[in-house]
């Protein structure tokens, strides 16, 4: 007797499959514009970030073209109609980072050393230098957030934060989307990171927590601009 492996599919895959069927059955034809993001979210009963991740998967499969500032259109070329698992989505990662890294930052504010502060300032300089190049790797950004996680002096938090960044970099969906964002001129905010350092230097947990939340909120909003203005 043979059994098939049971897999828990990511929500964006199910959404992408349903939306792709509209192209496959001819409901939407090449050149047609997809309904607005808000409308799709309401009809399918999912969040707007889930719709965005489904759209990224569909764009990677050549089913649609996302035209920033214009909308989402069915491609003229024949798509692969393959919307299989492409890894965890970028908006899901941002959501968990908002929860975890904000609290890690608050803990770090109470425990951080002067040496850690110096490391953060050095990472910020590296980040500013990286952003001058089109192929910025964002390694300095990862380093910056890892220093804060380590400064929380909680090895579990440090390990999870490090894993989240690795998860992002190992996901086809996330890495492809980040590459597109860089081409659109969206990069990590240097000013946001400066405010995080200021809060940590003041050893102010609440200010540090809020600075990290604002930073990740801003990153989420910047990523959403790829899909055009909210509608």
Image: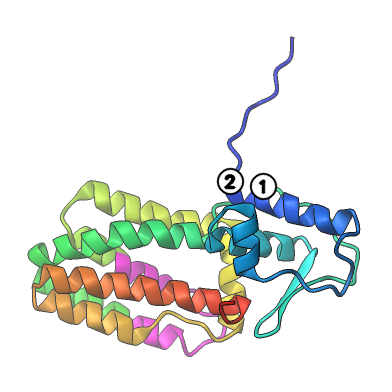
- Residue 4 position in % (x across, y down): 70, 23
Viewer-nearest of discs 2 and 1: 1
Query: Residue 94's spot in the image, x, y percent?
Result: 43, 63
In the picture, residue 122 is in which quadrant?
A: bottom left
Q: Is residue 179 left or right of residue 26?
A: left
The reply to whether discs 2 and 1 touch (Cβ–Cβ < 8 Å) is yes
Q: Is residue 135 magenta?
A: yes
Q: How many marks?
A: 2
Residue displayed at 17% across by 82% down:
198
Give the quadrant of the N terminus: top right
Determine whether the residue tagged by mark 2 lies in a helix, strand or loop.
Answer: loop
Left or right, 157 with respect to 183, comes to: left
Please name the residue that numbered disc 1 is placed on: 14
Q: Overall secondary structure of the magenta stretch?
A: helix
Q: Which mark is residue 10?
A: 2
Q: Nearer the viewer, residue 128 or 230?
A: 230
Estimate the x, y position of residue 229 in percent, counting from the top left.
58, 82
SS at mark 1? helix
Residue 8's spot in the image, x, y percent?
Answer: 58, 36
Picture quarter with the C terminus: bottom right
Residue at 19% x, 72% y is 208
Query: For this rendering, which residue is in front, 140 or 88?
Result: 88
Is residue 193 found left or right of 37 in the rendered image?
left
Q: Residue reaching furthest bottom?
A: 132
- Mark 2 nearby-residue class (10 Å; few <14, some 14–19, many ≥20): some
Q: Which residues are magenta?
A: 125-145
């Amino acid at each position: 007797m043979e059994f098939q492996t049971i897999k828990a599919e990511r929500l964006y895959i199910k959404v992408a499959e349903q939306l792709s069927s509209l192209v496959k059955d001819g409901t939407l034809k090449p050149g047609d514009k997809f309904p607005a993001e808000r409308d799709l979210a309401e009809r399918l009963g999912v969040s707007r970030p889930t719709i965005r991740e489904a759209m990224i998967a569909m764009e990677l499969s050549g089913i649609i073209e996302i035209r920033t500032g214009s909308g989402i259109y069915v491609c003229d070329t024949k798509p692969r109609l393959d919307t299989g698992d492409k890894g965890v989505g970028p908006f899901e990662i941002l959501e968990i980072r908002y929860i975890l890294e904000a609290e890690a930052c608050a803990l770090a504010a109470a425990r951080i050393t002067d040496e850690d502060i110096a490391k953060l300032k050095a990472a910020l300089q590296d980040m500013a230098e990286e952003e001058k190049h089109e192929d910025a790797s964002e390694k300095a950004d990862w380093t910056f957030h890892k220093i804060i996680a380590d400064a929380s002096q909680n090895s579990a938090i440090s390990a999870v934060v490090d894993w989240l960044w690795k998860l992002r970099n190992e996901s086809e969906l996330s890495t492809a989307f980040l590459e597109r964002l860089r081409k659109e001129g969206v990069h990590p905010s240097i000013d946001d990171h400066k405010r995080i350092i200021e809060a940590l230097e003041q050893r102010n947990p609440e200010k540090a927590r809020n600075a990290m939340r604002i930073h990740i909120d801003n990153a989420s909003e910047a990523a959403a601009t790829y899909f055009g203005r909210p509608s």
